[in-house]
Image: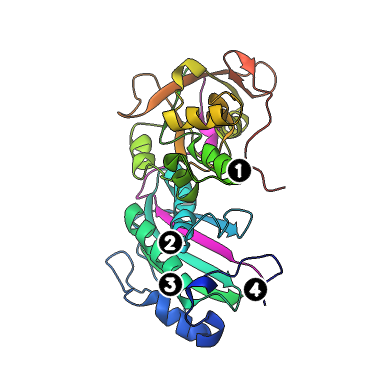
Amino acid sequence: MSEPGRRAPGRAGGGPTVGEVGEFGLIEAITRGLGPTASVPVSVGDDCAVLAPRGQVAVSTDTMVQDVHFKLQWSSARDVGRKLVASSMADVEAMGARPLGLVVSATLPVDTTVAWASEFAAGVREEAERCGAPLVGGDTSRGEAIVLTCTVLGDLEGRTPVLRSGARPGQVVAYIGNLGMAEAGVTVLRRGFRSPAAVVNAHRVPSPPYGQGLVAAEHGAGAMIDCSDGLVADLRHLAEASGVTIAIETDALSASDPQKTVAAAIGGADPLDFILRGGDDHAMLATFDPGRVPPGWTVIGGVADADGEPTVLVDGQPYAAPGGWTHF
């Protein structure tokens, strides 16, 4: 039985449940067609996958929990699968690594339909193809709610990883990707609406700028991070790891028309708050020496020596407003 008040995934669509087809029937349904590649000589079907990287391997794991990171009322199974991969693989991008492969663990209630699980798996594969890292394995189990975990691997191919601790005074701060779109989207969804579509879709499925982490590394990025917790929150992570002050200017940031629409609809809020506080877009944030910013990146500030504790300044002042994603 599902927890009272918790929607059973896929029941409205009918069809057999994962409890009815069993673990191996489910695995067969969601892994059909997977096989080896040049970089993955052993794929799904053995006790382990075997990968063939060219250099050191970057590894990261992310977990998404039903009603914490996604709601079935808001997102399709395909959306959830794509979001899991996108939010995980952004960490590989932020290290300057090339996506190599991923494994997914899915804990599902027994009354989850095979149709829902198959659509979720299709979303995983779709996003894996977008980022260039094949699904090479995983695990399934049963539980009271959906819990999804993705472990991603990236190949540094002989390059030095780009760390959070490498920002240096005199460098500039730049980003590429969306900022604050997902925050505007979840603001809309919490109020029971489904538009503007651009921000709602940004919450459902983030769009990391795949390939730009590698581009940043090739342009000598000093420090880099993906924007998952919020712009100011993630820049603070860089400032603290590097022992510097990062100062950004809001004149360099521009709210989109959908963000402005949402801000006006909720009482005239400042749409820049979505950008400064909002996470879950997984844009790339990095520091560069002046003159080495890659094409397509937007410079929003600079790095200076810390006058006391490392901090982030917005228009010359500490940013004191609440915001940024935390789990506890």
> Please, is residue 141 above or below residue 243 in the view?
below
Residue at 64%, 23% in the rendered image:
311
Q: Label 1 vs label 2: CA separation? A: 23 Å
Q: Label 2 vs label 4: CA separation? A: 20 Å
Residue at 48%, 85% in the rendered image:
24
Residue stretch rendered in magenta on the structure: 144-169
Of badges 4 and 1, nearer the viewer stands: 1
Is 73 or 103 nearer to us in this picture? 73
Visible residue check, residue 298: yes
- Taking the magenta stretch, the answer to whether it contains residue 159 is yes
Is 102 or 55 nearer to us in this picture? 102
Q: Secondary structure at mark 4?
A: loop
> Is disc 4 surrounded by few (<14), some (14 to 19) or many (20+) residues within 10 Å?
few
Amino acid on which disc 2 is placed: Arg
Query: Where on the picture, by quarter, is residue 230?
Result: top right
Visible residue check, residue 235: no
- Residue tagged by mark 3? 118
- Residue tagged by mark 1? 191
Sequence-wise, which precedes: disc 2 or disc 4?
A: 2
> Is disc 3 surrounded by few (<14), some (14 to 19) or many (20+) residues within 10 Å?
some
- Residue tagged by mark 2? 78
CB atoms of marks 3 and 4 within 8 Å: no
Residue found at the far top of this picture: 316
Sequence-wise, which precedes: disc 1 or disc 2?
A: 2
- Taking the magenta stretch, the answer to whether it contains residue 11 is no
- Residue tagged by mark 4? 143
